[in-house]
Amino acid sequence: MSCAVYNGWCPVHGFQHGAEAEELREGIESLMERFAGSVPNIELQALLDRVDARDSVARLDAMRKSP
Amino acid sequence: MSDVVLGMFIEKVRTALDLLAQIMSSSDERVSFATAPNLKELQWASTALQCISHRLREGRAAKPSVANAAAFKTSLAQDLAIMGIRLQSIVFGRGTGGSRFWLLNILDRDDCLRTVEVPIPSHLDSYDNDVGEAIYDALRKHSKDSNYG
C-alpha cells in the first residue's frame, strides 16, 4: 500500500510526496529571516494554512483504510 | 521511509507549530526565537523539517531497501529523532523457535529510558524498510499514554 516517496509525481495521490516538508521548511526559514528572530503568530498560522497538508491528509486516509 | 511514515512525521511537525501559534494569543504578540519559552518547540520543528529534507535528499540517491545494519540503524535513529525519541541502542535477538526481534533502548522526551521489543516478521529481512515501519508502529502502540505517541 506504500507509494514511492522519492520518485517524483505519485499517480495514486496526484502530488509529489515530501514536497510539503520542503515547503514548510522553506517557510519557517523565510519567517526566521524576515522577522529576525521574532515571528508574529499570525504569520506562523498563515504559513500552515498556505502549505497544503497533502502528505498529512494522505497518511490519515491510509490509516482509515487499513484494517 | 514510506509515504505513511513521511505523513506521520509531517503531521507531528504541523501539530507542534499549530499549538505554538495558538499559544501566542494575539497577532501582536510575538515569539522570540532567542528568549521565548516556546524555543524548544520551534527548534524541534526546525530540526525535524531539516531531518525530513535530509532523508528525502538521501533517499533519492539510495536504493529502495536498506542494505546493511549500519545504514539501517543510522536512518532509524534519524527518523526516531524526528519523533522526539533518542535511540540509545538497538540489539538483534533470536527467540525460541527461531523468532527474531529487535530490542530497542530509547530515551523519550521526558528523558525516560524505555525498552521496546519489536518482532521481525518471518518473511522480511532484518534490515528491511518494512521492519523500520514495524518499529514505528510498535513505538506508537507502546507509548499511547506518552507525549510522543
Image: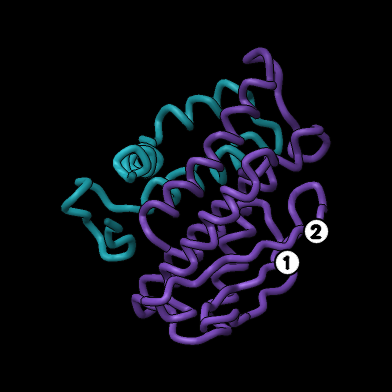
Chain colours: A cyan, B purple
The image's mark for residue B113 is 2
At mark 2, the secondary structure is: strand
Does the image show residue B38?
A: yes
Chain letter for mark 2 = B
Q: How far apart are marks 1 and 2 (CA)?
A: 7 Å
Q: What's the residue type where badge 2 is placed?
A: Leu
Chain letter for mark 1 = B
Q: Where is residue B56 in the image (x, y as percent from the top left)?
A: 43, 64
Vertical order, B11 against A18 (above or below): above
Q: Position of residue B101 (x, y in %)?
A: 57, 74
Residue occupying the point 71% across, 61% down: B86
Residue occupying the point 61% across, 48% down: B46
The image's mark for residue B128 is none
Residue occupying the point 81% across, 53% down: B112
Question: Mark 1 or mark 2: which comes first in sequence?
Answer: 1
Q: Where is residue A17 in the image (x, y as percent from the top left)?
A: 33, 53
Residue A52 falls left or right of residue B45:
left
At mark 1, the secondary structure is: strand
Q: Nearest the camera: A24 or B71?
A: B71
1 and 2 marks in contact (CB < 8 Å): yes
Residue A35 falls left or right of residue B66:
right
Q: What's the residue type where badge 1 is placed?
A: Asn
Pick the quarter of the image with the N terminus of chain B: bottom left
Specify few, some or many for label 1: CA neighbours under 10 Å numbering under 14, 14-19, or 20 or more. Answer: some
Residue occupying the point 62% across, 80% down: B93
Q: Badge 1 is on which residue? A: B105
Vertical order, B134 against B9 (above or below): below
